[in-house]
Amino acid sequence: MTKRFFARQNSQFGTSFELLSQRKWARFVLPVLLASLVAGCDQNSNKPVAQGEKKAAPGPSLTAPPPIDVAAASPHTSPDAKSEVGARDSVESGNTTPAVPAVGVTSTPSTTASLSSAVEVGTNEASKEGEATLQVEPSKEAGAGESLVTVTGDSADKTDGGRNKLNSDPDRKDGTPITVATEAERNQKIASDWPKPWAALFVTGQQKGYIEPCGCTGLENQKGGLNRRDTLLKLIQDRGWNVVPLDAGSQVRRKGRQAEMIFRFSADAMAKMGYRAIALGQQDLQLNSAELLQITASEGNQKTAFTSANVSIVDPSLMNQWQVIEINGRKIGVTSVLGNSKKPESTSDEIMIDDPVTSLQKAMEQLKQQQCNYYVLIAHANLTESAELARSVPGFDLVVTAGGEGEPTYLPEPIEGTKGVMVQVGVKGMYVGLIGLFDDVNNPVRYQRIALSSQFEDSSRMMEAFRGYQEQLQKQGLQRLEVVPTSHPTGRKFVGTQSCAECHTTAFEVWKNTPHAHATQSLIHPGERSDIARHFDPECLSCHVTGWNPQKYYPYDSGYLSVEQTPLMMENGCENCHGPGSQHVAAENGDIEADEALLKTFREEMRLPLAQAQDKCLECHDIDNSPNFHRDGAFEEFWEQVKHYGKD
């Protein structure tokens, strides 16, 4: 079936899938498209970094636990070999995702799984809020499976059983966007008072294409990124803990060839990190089905971590419906489901999405036959549906949900009517949830939310992967990335900043002394984050050159194409704010006939009233790329740095 599917895809998509016909199906995974982090905007940074300089990040405070008897073998491999991230690994093994047990088996709850849950929040000294312990005890008044929740500790008056966020980050009170790390988030102590758990779940999700944070505020201020995630994982594994990474899905946020490359890169990165179960998210399922199948399918010798009880591509037998993870004689049963609340509006005919409750019931039956000690549901659904799924299919100890906006809660949320609790993964891959499982009837479960701040240094093996990703973008080129120039809505063309400078000399002198005048150079020589150039990356170019749509990542006709082809369109020039100036310049130079009325019309078209300027700025200085631009009064502050008016 899969051979016939790819034969049809080859004829439909032509050269995009020529490589598939040259390989045996047992090795269907294409060479991994390695990645380099999405470039950050250096423009408008108040603290520019010298070229080639890398700012030092404070070392993570990861206190070692008491001595352990047996150090568990870590799936994390050495970060120093480039061969780890090279395409030849994929060619040799035919595998870009971690090996997992075969699909299809079930379990009955054990005494460990039925114990009442207790979740202890990891101490964070910087927050100065004290320690809170969430006890979930069997209810004497509630019906079967229900629980009462009590909160003890200094933070008890600041939480509602984990439903609301604890107000423990004073830096956040002034409206600082969540993409910016607080002082507390840059000085976290990771499970410093935990004994060694028999298993530690490492939960992530909702990456939405942010393989690295991108922003003008500087990386030291922002959160997220696979390179920091890898470092945190390695630090926890080095304690000798049995770490089980799980992901709630949505690796990408848009369609297109570059999004497919990001999905493949993310899958390969998570394979290297040893992920054991990965859900398929709403945005993931909008990608090309052939590309998805190559990466997610389990067949023959290829066993992937991608798991879904109700989503399959081409053939249901190619998707893991559940996973059983064995650790020193104990079993963790994991399945995932795509909820109706996150179901894509449209997908290809090859992607099948079944009823989530019916599919989840079947997966749970199989897991119970395996007699697991702990049951985990990864729900790619909103908060309400995630809880309802747990009630509809009883038995889950933990629900990891892709629901919720912004920061995850500080405490797990008890799910009414069940013995389980729910944790959120947050957005844009900025957080990791660490859940420790213990042989302690009083505290069998502990939880800590961890921000991926600059506290965690870049993983060397991930940085090499990012370099490979950028090299792949360069080899692909804009055309093969399906980045095609289109007409500007005005119908005019771009002429370049030098043409503006002939008359607007004062404004040009102001512009020359702003970061906008070096925007492309900041991609060619990034400085702050590494020596990896990013001027072949459409997601970076859109705000660092002249003549692109900043939010949809494509050039307009006559806009920037490359350093060699369009040198006059380098940097973030005048026309990005004022619009393409071909008609205005031609009329002023006498290249076209224009009376005073027409000259005035063209001049008016190029003006950007100050009242409208902020909206134009926000096209590039959005919440992702420039969170400090969203503080109260920020526009007025930044305008003073670039202020210019009209002709001399």
Image (tube, rainbow, N blue to C red):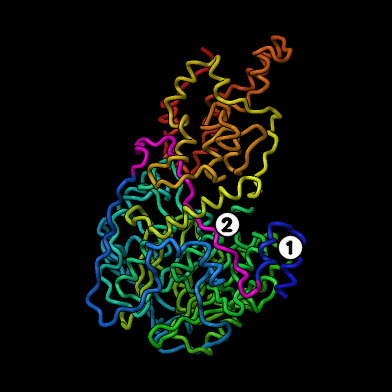
> Above or below — where is 43 with respect to 220?
above
Question: Quick one: SS at disc 1?
Answer: helix
> Above or below — where is 252 with respect to 374?
above
Question: Quick one: SS at disc 2?
Answer: helix
Q: What residue is at 39 percent from the left and 86 percent from the top?
A: 112
Q: Position of residue 207 (x, y in %)?
A: 50, 58
- Residue on which the image places disc 1: 10
Q: Position of residue 165 (x, y in %)?
A: 39, 59
- Residue on which the image places disc 2: 261
Q: What residue is at 55 percent from the left and 62 percent from the top?
A: 32
Give the CA distance from mark 1 to mark 2. Answer: 18 Å
The residue lying furthest to the top in this view is 596
The 10 Å Cα crowd at callout 2, few under 14, some 14 to 19, many 20 or more, is many
Task: Mark yes or no: residue 403 visible.
Answer: no
**Marks 2 and 1: in contact by CB < 8 Å?**
no
Residue type at mark 1 is: Asn
Badge nearest the viewer, 1 or 2: 1
> Above or below — where is 250 with respect to 533?
below
Residue type at mark 2 is: Met
Task: Mark yes or no: residue 490 visible.
Answer: yes
Residue 612 is a magenta residue: no
Q: Is residue 460 left or right of residue 315?
A: left
N-term mark: 1 or 2: 1
Q: Quadrant of the N terminus?
A: bottom right
Please report the bounds of the magenta region as a residue range.
24-53
Q: Is residue 438 left or right of residue 366?
A: left
Q: What residue is at 44 percent from the left and 27 percent from the top?
A: 639
